[in-house]
Amino acid sequence: FYFNNQPVSNSTEEQLGWLYADSLIIFSVWQAAQLIAEKSSAPVYFYKFDFEGRYSYRYRLGTQIPYGVGHHDDLIYLFYIKPFFPLFNQTDPEAYMVRTLTSIYANFAHFGVPTLPDPTTQWYPMTKNTLQHLNIGKPQTMKSGLPYP
């Protein structure tokens, strides 16, 4: 997946970086979720944040163009981080994601279930027999299996 059958070399250093980053963060989080789903009776709600807005914690070198969706970009839509990002208003394209994420987190904190604002999409917890996750983008969709390679 990472190298498209190419050998590791200077020309594949970016792919090696992705593999390294995924091994540090993504795979360990996924393993923890699987372990909790297997050993606990509590529901495990797993998601992949896949919304690419105008702002990110990572930009293409020398530009203000986001380099795809990055680790903790979801926090941009949950908290106003004044030194780095603007306060979004209702007409901004990011307003949709602010409403979506704040609704999910508020519902989870209040009711114990991360209900989405769009009633046509249900977020089902993963279990030891059903590995699944919510893809949080525009729109939200339930997907089966591991959300990464």
Image (spheres, rainbow, N blue to C red):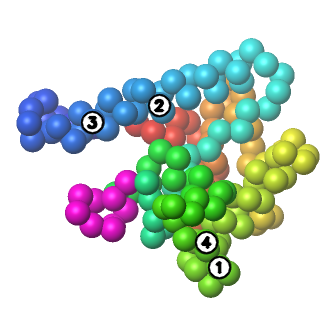
- What's under tag 4, amino acid-wise? Leu
- Residue located 62% across and 44% down the image: 47
Q: Residues within 10 Å of mark 1 (few under 14, many from 20)?
A: few
62 above or below 33? below
Task: Find out whether the residues at labels 3 and 4 contact each other: C-beta distance under 8 Å.
Answer: no
Residue located beneath label 2 in the image: 25
Which residue range is magenta in the image?
Answer: 58-66
Q: Which mark is residue 79?
A: none
78 above or below 12? below
- What's under tag 2, amino acid-wise? Ile
* Cα distance between the residues tagged 1 and 3: 35 Å
- What's under tag 1, amino acid-wise? Asn
**In the orientation shown, which residue stands out farthest toward the left?**
10
Badge nearest the viewer, 1 or 3? 1
Residue located beneath label 3 in the image: 17
Circle 1 SS class = loop
Residue 149 lies left or right of residue 105; in this view the side is left
Q: Which mark is residue 89?
A: 1
Q: Residues within 10 Å of mark 4 (few under 14, many from 20)?
A: few
**Viewer-proximal residue among 91 and 130:** 91
- Residue located 58% across and 59% down the image: 81
